[in-house]
Image (spheres, rainbow, N blue to C red):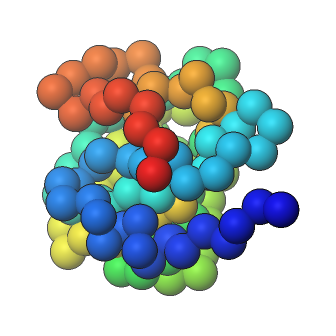
Amino acid sequence: MPAPVDLAAVLAQIDQPWQPRTVAVLNDYDLRVVHTKGEFTRHSHPETDEVFLVLSGSLTIRMDDGDVTLGPGQLCVVPRGTPHQPCSPDGAQVLLVEPSATVNTGDTPSELTAQRRLA
């Protein structure tokens, strides 16, 4: 029988922003939690949509068609191929849903590119 996942406990173990942890796998998709703080790399995912669900704090997703600002309990689906830049001046805790093979920086590798890590 699967055990429940304590998101708060996993997030408490993460000491750097923009370093997601996979907390569960659903079919071929990872559910990842991440601390955000400051600006992330502008990038896109040519092959997949990406879901951002804010657990706490505030996250703005900058896109060419306009910014989307999310608070706790709000989510946004960024369509595949859409350039976007997550930004969180004050920090946020976010749940991401994306295919397991998805790299966090998409088509724009940078110093913020993170290896897939299981919690």
Q: Is residue 89 left or right of residue 116?
A: left
Which of 37 and 79 lies nearest the eye of the viewer?
Answer: 37
Residue pictured at 36% horizontal, 80% vertical: 57
> Residue 2's x, y, as percent?
77, 61
- Any part of residue 4 in sight: yes
Residue 100, image quadrant:
top right
Residue pictured at 60% horizontal, 68% vertical: 5
Which of 84 and 11 lies nearest the eye of the viewer?
Answer: 11
Extreme-front residue of the structure: 1
Please tell me whether residue 97 is drawn above or below residue 44 in the rendered image.
below
- Any part of residue 71 in sight: no
Please tell me whether residue 40 is drawn above or below residue 87 in the rendered image.
above
Please tell me whether residue 1 is drawn above or below residue 100 in the rendered image.
below
Q: Is residue 17 left or right of residue 53?
A: left
The image quadrant where one finds the N terminus is bottom right
Q: Is residue 98 left or right of residue 21?
A: right
Residue pictured at 29% horizontal, 18% vertical: 109
Q: Is residue 103 left or right of residue 79?
A: left
Residue pictured at 25% horizontal, 70% vertical: 91
Residue 117, image quadrant:
top left
> Residue 13's x, y, as percent?
29, 64
Please tell me whether residue 92 is drawn above or below residue 79 in the rendered image.
below
> Residue 66's x, y, as percent?
47, 53
